[in-house]
Amino acid sequence: MLSLLAITSEPLELERIAAALAASVGADAGADGAVVTFLGLVRNHNLARSVRYLEYEAYAPLALKAFERIATEIRDRWPSARLALHHRVGRLEIGEASVAIAARSPHRADAYAACRYAIERVKQIAPIWKREFFDGGDVWIEGATADPDDQRARAEAERAACA
Amino acid sequence: MRVTVRLFARLRDIAGVSELARDLAPGATIGDLWRQLAHEFPELARYERSISSAVNADYARMDQRVSDGDEIAFLPPVSGG
């Protein structure tokens, strides 16, 4: 069966990820009333640059631990929600999916919140980097300093999730 | 003692390698190792306040002591998603 948390160089298949999440819940799946999914796509523009493609790299063993941490944080905050999270690495063309998330729960509010929280936390603490190749050059994108114990960042992600 | 250093993204580009081995004095911290590398590759120095570090694929603090055989990773600000 497909892992719920993964770093992969293969194209992401949201349907299969959502199906794996449903299977993992087992007999309790009938209690869930909502699945919220998110697909992050490679965009053809960024900061007024025309983007040609992106290259993603990850420190895979630590990234998987970060994903596990995100799943644990979600269970602490939304105990009935369950998460699947896959991130792609390697060269990605415009329009391809870089990240796929599925969150399910008995009620939609928790599924929406868990899904949004997961992507916010990925951007904060997952050791993954994108290099942008644009018309005229390339640049490593550098966002947040990864610190899983930064409670302020975690609270920010929670605020976004519950907005 | 001898440790393995892993560098990612722009840090790897600056050093020109993704992995290298370094000898450290007993009791050395991750911060000591970082300063040694920043001396060797001066362009790394501007990441002093924005990097994260990991020991054997677990996030760690810069004042953590390292042990013989550890894999120490230095991570520039992340940009997944």
Image (cartoon, coloured by chain):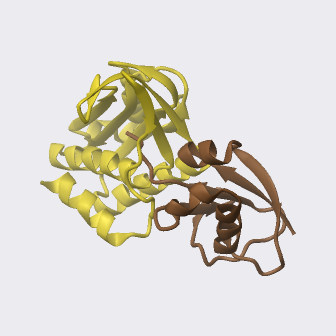
Chain colours: A yellow, B brown
Q: Please indicate, yes or no, whether residue A104 appears anywhere in the rendered image.
A: yes
Residue nearest the viewer, comparing A131 with A92: A131
Residue nearest the viewer, comparing B2 with A96: B2
Quadrant in the picture for residue A20: top left
**How many numbered marks have been drawn onto this rendered protein structure?**
0
Farthest residue to the bottom: give it: B27
Q: Residue at x 35, y 63 (%)?
A: A76
Whole-percent x, y for residue B59 in the image: 57, 63
Q: Residue at x 49, y 44 (%)?
A: A128
Farthest residue to the right: give it: B1
Q: Up-down: is A64 above or below A92?
A: below
Q: Please indicate, yes or no, whether residue A132 appears anywhere in the rendered image.
A: no
Q: Residue at x 66, y 56 (%)?
A: B41
Q: Is residue B66 left or right of residue A134?
A: right
Whole-percent x, y for residue B66 in the image: 74, 72
Farthest residue to the left: give it: A163
Quadrant in the picture for residue A58: top right
Q: Up-down: is B69 above or below A42?
A: below
Q: Is residue A151 left or right of residue A148?
A: left
Q: Residue at x 32, y 64 (%)?
A: A153
Whole-percent x, y for residue A119 in the image: 32, 45
Q: Up-down: is A154 above or below A107?
A: below
Split into 4 quadrants, where in the image is the C terminus of chain B?
top left
Residue nearest the viewer, comparing B50 with A92: B50
Q: Up-down: is A56 above or below A110?
A: above
Split into 4 quadrants, where in the image is the N terminus of chain B?
bottom right
Q: Is residue B30 left or right of residue B46?
A: right
